[in-house]
Amino acid sequence: MAGTTLVLDGLAKRYNDGPAAVDHITLEVAPGELLGLLGPSGCGKTTTLRMIGGLTPTSAGRILVDGHDVTALPPHKRDMGIVFQSYALFPHMDVAANIAFGLEMRGCSRKEIAEKVAAVLELVRLGDLARRRPKELSGGQQQRVALARALVIAPRILLLDEPLSNLDAKLREEMRAEITDIQRRLGITTVFVTHDQGEALAMCDRIAVMEHGRVAQLGTPHAIYEHPASEFVADFVGRSNRIAARAGAGGTIALGDHVFRTAVPAPAGPVTLMIRPHRIELGPPPGPDWNTCSGVVRRVTYVGDLLALEVECAGASFHVERPTQPGTAAPPVGTTTSLAWRTADTLAFPRTA
């Protein structure tokens, strides 16, 4: 299964006379890479996945697998495994029969089917549940069956369409680790659709953040999070303060009487100042390469592993997140405190509205 390259070359989808659902995407998925398509509802990520799998016809562009154009091929001839959001298991079949279905459609012998089903059941840790029906399984077990059914045909490419969205938070964390481990072990080229930025950051080698049918930014999780290319990416991937300010000469940012510095200067004019809440410290700046302001604490919320504070500074509301520590109390509401954050954590993007 390893060694397959997937290329999307100007891929587009338009329904009737409406706006483009997918607007001429061009990108390459390397052999064995797990690429995430991340974005809000309606951004075109699932449509892109369905075009790759042959479930939705393209309006323009090509889909290449190891250099071979598969754009016009039906789904069963693309050699791809798909795991749907709803799992799409056959309720009248047991686990083994669900997994074997694709092999039977390919005309495999009974002996080959039995061997492959047994092997993939062990891979997803369901060896003792082969005779159960889907309704007798937990959500996580059903998800494993769907994954096993996609993998048993030994596809060259694996497509995952929000496979964890129906699971509770704790089970999602467990299953994303399992999926990642299996994908790494098999070395299978994978495209993973999700609207959950935490899943994308934790699981993917690279992420394509999508906005209005286009790729707003493509890069590693670290690059996407630490160096967002736009206000949309910075706001969608992780939590950020978004504060109206103004950029001046030399890359400085003015907010009331305060002047802040940024790592990447923004063009002079109205900007959105963005700082991640957990990058803001309480107290004076610990070094010269920090921005600082003082303000009044308006709200303190205890949420277990962190304290969430709202501090009014220069007419703007700054949200601050600090990890809880034994014996450490937050400043009381109504008191004045200092905020500090590194220049490298200060982002500014031109404001259009």
Image (cartoon, rainbow, N blue to C red):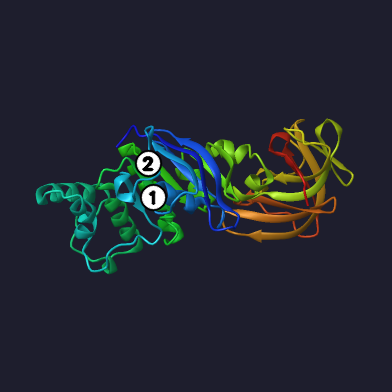
Disc ID at residue 342:
none
Q: Is residue 141 left or right of residue 335?
A: left
Dot 1, how many residues are within 10 Å of its Cα: few (below 14), some (14-19), or many (20+)? many
Q: Position of residue 82 (x, y in %)?
A: 35, 51
Identity of the residue furthest to the left in this view: 111
Look at mark 1 in the image and give the residue it sits on: 54
Look at mark 2 in the image and give the residue it sits on: 70
Identity of the residue furthest to the right in this view: 257
Name which residue type carries label 2.
Val
> What residue is rendered at 47% in x and 35% in y?
28
Give yes or no for contact between labels 2 and 1 (Cβ–Cβ under 8 Å): yes
Looking at the image, is 334 positioned above or below residue 115? below
Looking at the image, is 331 positioned above or below residue 155? below
Dot 2, how many residues are within 10 Å of its Cα: few (below 14), some (14-19), or many (20+)? some
CA separation, marks 2 and 1?
A: 9 Å
Identity of the residue furthest to the front in this view: 17
Q: Count all numbered tags in the image, as a single digit.
A: 2
Q: Which residue is at the front of the view, 286 or 70? A: 70
> What residue is rendered at 50% in x and 49% in y?
59
Q: Position of residue 170 (x, y in %)?
A: 43, 57
Q: Position of residue 180 (x, y in %)?
A: 38, 44
> What residue is rendered at 89% in x and 44% in y?
257
Q: Position of residue 339 (x, y in %)?
A: 76, 45
Name which residue type carries label 1.
Gly
